[in-house]
Image (tube, coloured by chain):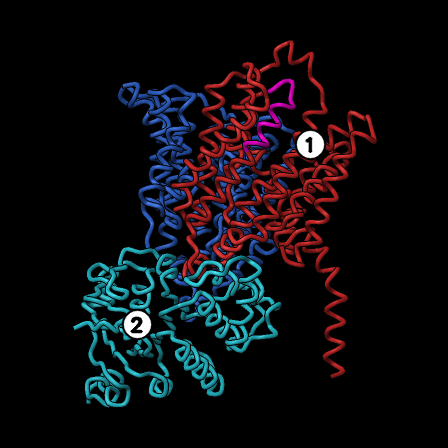
Chain colours: A blue, B cyan, C red
Amino acid sequence: MILAQSAVFGLLIGSLYGLAAVGLTLVFGVLKILNVAHGELIMLGGYAAFWLFALWHVDPFVSVLPTGAALFLVGILLYRTLFGRLLRAGEETKLKNSILIGFGLALVLQTIALAAWTGDERAVTTSYAGGVLPLGGIVIPLARLGALAVAFVVVALLHVFLHHTYPGKAIRATAEDVDAASLAGIPVPAVFLTAFGLGSALAGVAGTLAAVTDTVSPSIGLAWTLKALIVVVLGGLGSVAGAFVAGCGLGVVESVSGILLGNAYREVVGLVLFLAVLAVRPRGLFARG
Amino acid sequence: MPASSDLLEARGLTKTFGGLRAVNELSFTVRAGEILGLLGPNGSGKTTVFNLIAGALAPDRGGVFLEGREITALAPHRRAALGIVRTFQLVRALPGLTVLDNVLVARLYGRVRAAGVREARTESLECLEFAGLAGLAARPAGALTLAERKRLEVARALAAGPRLLLLDEPAAGLNPTEVAALLALFRRIRAGGVTIVIVEHNVGAIRDLCDRIVVLNAGRKIAEGPPRETLEHAGVVEVYLGAP
Amino acid sequence: MDRRTLPSAALAAAALAAAALLPAMTGSRAVLSWTFLVLLYVALAQSWNVLGGFGGQVNLGHAALFGVGAVTTRLLWTGGTPIALALPAGTALAAVTGAVIGAPALRLRGPYFAIGTLAVAEICRITAGNVLPDIAALPPQALAAYTLAPRYYLALGLAALTTAVAAWIAGARFGRGLVAVREDEDVAESVGVDAYGHTLIAFVISAALAGAAGGVFAYYHVGFYPSFAFSPLWTFDPLLIVYLGGVGTVAGPIVGAIVFLALREALALRLGELHLLIFGVLFIAIVVALPGGIVQAVRDVIDRPRAIRTTEVTSTS
């Protein structure tokens, strides 16, 4: 029973891992770059949710929308000033440079956040935060359940967008073959811009939910980025569905490991599993081609 | 029946990608000292054959033999050490290095290995001269014209001391003057004792240069023989122009 | 070594000679401590540069090798082994760790290699934090006998050694093969270079040197926090230094270390944590605008008059 409880808990946590990874994998799939400052964008989303709540009592589940929109704009700004410049280089160089630029950007964002908001840990505690939903013998925290619901809905909406709307299909076509998409008349630069903005917006949403279920401080970026990177690779670079599923899976694995091996090694199991997957399938579990 | 003057033998090579059989039970030999042309329409498997001979790909079935000795399991760098050197379809110079440094690596690691870096430098300069690139030694390879970069690839391949040189569409993208100069270079290379297999779309170049040609279609060999007669073979014409 | 690397190497030698003479010229503890740090960072940056610069493989798990060297050396030394044996032992163990990590990791393509090594380093950091004590203080005799001089010269020796290794790589056959693999692995293989073998050797060399740096670090500090030796700081600081100074060059890590630590010293006092902002912006600027770092910038300035002269000659002919 303890295991079942921990598995459910892991699923709740994992849904956030998945959401965090989806933005990163979308950007990679379309632009073939890795924004390792993704965790810092999540951090910014978390702060946005916190301040909206602290100053104007906006419920975090509502502030998902404005935060997502704000981070979309941030993403566009970052693309215009930084990441857009990378795209002319060859594949390996582009990827390497994106990792390096992301690293510098992470440093900048982290320091700005530290200067603006101090290193104190922040969290959003709503009135219903302590509530739980008993299901069978398992206790489900309401806030985390809400986060799972929002994460799932967002990813589902993204899936519908990518598969059943014209802009979404244009994005997928560009991800599949950028030259063919260009020849077919798809405005590739606009697609790149949109995809990067979307990826950042998704990070913002993940950050909002993280503010509810976790704490936010300037230094959380690196941990989130690492988690997202691992989930992205597990799910297959570029696969949105794969990332979400892998994220949920990782959450369950971590949680159950924590029970079986003790909290100190909770994360190690996930990392070792990640390395094992890389060894056997060097391109992730769900990668295509 | 493979003869003792055969330098290379491809025996029953088969390679499948996904559902597509790119090379299908392909067998042919390359005689020492000849220039063999490999022709076929796009998608007929020519570059795959090169990759199989050079070791960049492993065949699903069949084998590659160098002077009777099986080399199918050898990695590309080991085959280079034995004297099989290839150029690339999309010219790949090392753009961040100078022209000389591009060639220098080959002289240090190829079948003919210089005694040290200093000797390698001198010998690499000779290879550059042979390929007509003397004077460009200090220039960054990225600053060369397409024709010059193709010569650089050839110079680099030569520096490795090849016995078998695999040229993948060397004439692509060049004007007729540049092509003629390149063909002259290849004849000089063969005169130096190097066997050449060349993949080309430029049929005129093939006709002038090659001793024999092998024609592929959909991964199979459909014709083989001296250029003139083979090109007039009905099956070959059909493959290029469509059935009458 | 060709004509182009000679000035760079000469500069490096001069810098190290100056560092050797410093203790004779000043007794200031602050100056010597700062210079010690520069020398340590030079060694650490050179070690990352072997694989990251010359080899072209971005290793984000460098801290793990530093940590292994540091912890091994510290445990042996405080346990009674003389430093002359403890340090090589730490170096050797770091080299072995490098081989163990590198052998499978180098089968992975670029981004997967980077993320994979990052994951390995995280595993090491978490495990070290769980298994090792929080702090390893010096036993009283060692504390009483502590002087800066041997640490300083050890760091100097290591900085010189790592620079010499870099210079060797820049000119020797192995290094040319390694650089060719970095530029284009398929091309390198086509002329006889064993790409996997070369990058693996580079990884082990890089690991050994990083472990040695870790050992010197462990020897220097009175209060030593074992899990701190595995902090990602020991990956990202040398990375920043190498790119700042000039990735893939011999003098780059030296120039970068001096500029990095001088800037940090100057800025941290006035700006506090904000100095990291400057570094972040600087780093981005380098990657975007000046990928060859400070060394490249200097070379461009030096070469410009020569380029102008050449065009003048050709235009009059």
Q: Is residue C291 above or below residue B150?
A: above
Q: Residue at x 59, y 22 (%)?
A: C83
Residue that lies at the very extreme toward the left in this rendered image: B1
Q: Is residue B180 magenta?
A: no
In the rendered structure, which segment of residues is drawn in magenta?
A: C211-224
Give x and y (percent) for residue B94: 52, 63
Q: Decide: few, some or many residues near mark 2? Use Cα within 10 Å; few <14, some 14-19, many ≥20.
A: many
Quarter of the image with the N terminus of chain C is bottom right
Whether residue A200 appears in this view of the structure is no
Q: Is residue A180 above or below residue A204?
A: below
Q: Residue at x 20, y 86 (%)?
A: B243
Q: Is residue C132 left or right of residue C258?
A: left
Say what amino acid the circle numbered 1 marks: Leu
Mark sitting on residue B237: none
**Mark 2 falls on what kind of element?**
helix
Q: Is residue A183 above or below residue C108?
A: below
Q: Which residue is mark 1?
A: C37
Q: Which residue is mark 2?
A: B46
Of residues C274 and B197, the one nearer the viewer is B197
Quarter of the image with the C terminus of chain C is bottom right
Q: Is residue C20 above or below residue A232?
A: above
